[in-house]
């Protein structure tokens, strides 16, 4: 069961990459195909990420991509590639990427939290 999902997941990811058709819809398929594998490995569970990452939307709201107050630009993270999100959050947590606000936000996240939140955010944009 798991190995079947794994094969599907890898195949769809690879074909999506190599075909050069990595548009939102295709990415969405790749991401959702990837989800069942997630529970078996370090990768994320989007449903869990939704509850863990809810507060992130206070700043990373999808509407205007600015914080409510004070107003400053906040990067678009919904629909961002899952691997990019994981790397960014790990870098903030390790403080190898400088930004006090995000370092504070990432400080308490476990690897599992990061994986779940990344899965949730990346799937969010691929409607
Ligand atoms: C208080 C506001 C605030 C909150 C809350 C917040 N962020 Fe951020 N986030 C920012 C800002 C500002 C940046 C830009 C930092 C920089 O320039 O490196 C950022 C950057 C990021 C990036 C890097 C984006 C990129 O394009 O490189 C990721 C990923 C991210 N945040 C995820 C999260 C997650 C996940 C949460 C919830 C656990 C969260 N953020 C909560 C303000 C916030």
Image (spheres, rainbow, N blue to C red):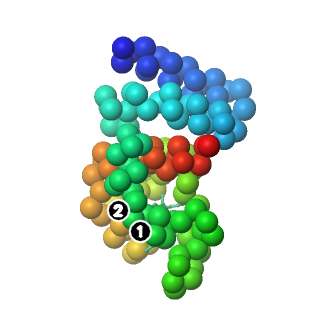
Secondary structure category for the residue under label 1: helix
Cα distance in 3D space between marks 1 and 2: 6 Å
Q: Are marks 1 and 2 in contact (CB under 8 Å)?
A: yes
Beta carbon of the mark 2 residue lies under 8 A of ligand 1: yes
Q: Which mark is residue 80?
A: none
Secondary structure category for the residue under label 2: helix
Q: Position of residue 125 (x, y in %)?
A: 59, 48
Q: Position of residue 71 (x, y in %)?
A: 56, 82
Beta carbon of the mark 1 residue lies under 8 A of ligand 1: yes
| Closer to the camera in the image, 47 or 71 | 47
Question: Horizontal placement of 53 versus 75: left or right?
Answer: left
Residue 97 can be seen in this image: no
Question: Horizontal placement of 73 versus 40: left or right?
Answer: right
Q: Position of residue 51 (x, y in %)?
A: 35, 53
Return the residue at label 2. Answer: 106
Residue name at image x 58 percent, y 23 percent: 12
Return the residue at label 1. Answer: 102
Q: Name the quadrant containing residue 18.
A: top right
Other residues around mark 2 within 10 Å, as few (<14) / some (14–19) / many (≥20): many
Residue name at image x 40 percent, y 60 percent: 54
Is the N terminus in the top left, top right, bottom left or bottom right quadrant? top left
| Closer to the camera in the image, 100 or 60 | 60
Residue name at image x 59 percent, y 36 percent: 28
What is the residue that sits farthest to the bottom in this orientation?
A: 70
Residue 12 can be seen in this image: yes
Other residues around mark 1 within 10 Å, as few (<14) / some (14–19) / many (≥20): some
Question: Horizontal placement of 63 versus 70: left or right?
Answer: right
């Amino acid at each position: 069961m798991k190995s079947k999902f794994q094969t599907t997941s890898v195949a769809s990811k690879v074909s999506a990459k190599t075909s050069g058709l990595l548009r939102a819809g295709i990415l969405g398929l790749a991401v959702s195909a990837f989800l069942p594998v997630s529970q078996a490995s370090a990768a994320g569970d989007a449903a869990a990420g939704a509850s863990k990452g809810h507060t992130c939307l206070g700043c990373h709201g999808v509407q205007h991509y600015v914080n409510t107050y004070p107003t400053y630009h906040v990067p678009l993270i919904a629909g961002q590639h899952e691997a990019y999100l994981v790397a960014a959050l790990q870098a903030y947590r390790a403080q190898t990427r400088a930004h006090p606000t995000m370092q504070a936000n990432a400080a308490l996240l476990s690897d599992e939290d990061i994986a779940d939140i990344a899965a949730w955010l990346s799937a969010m944009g691929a409607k």
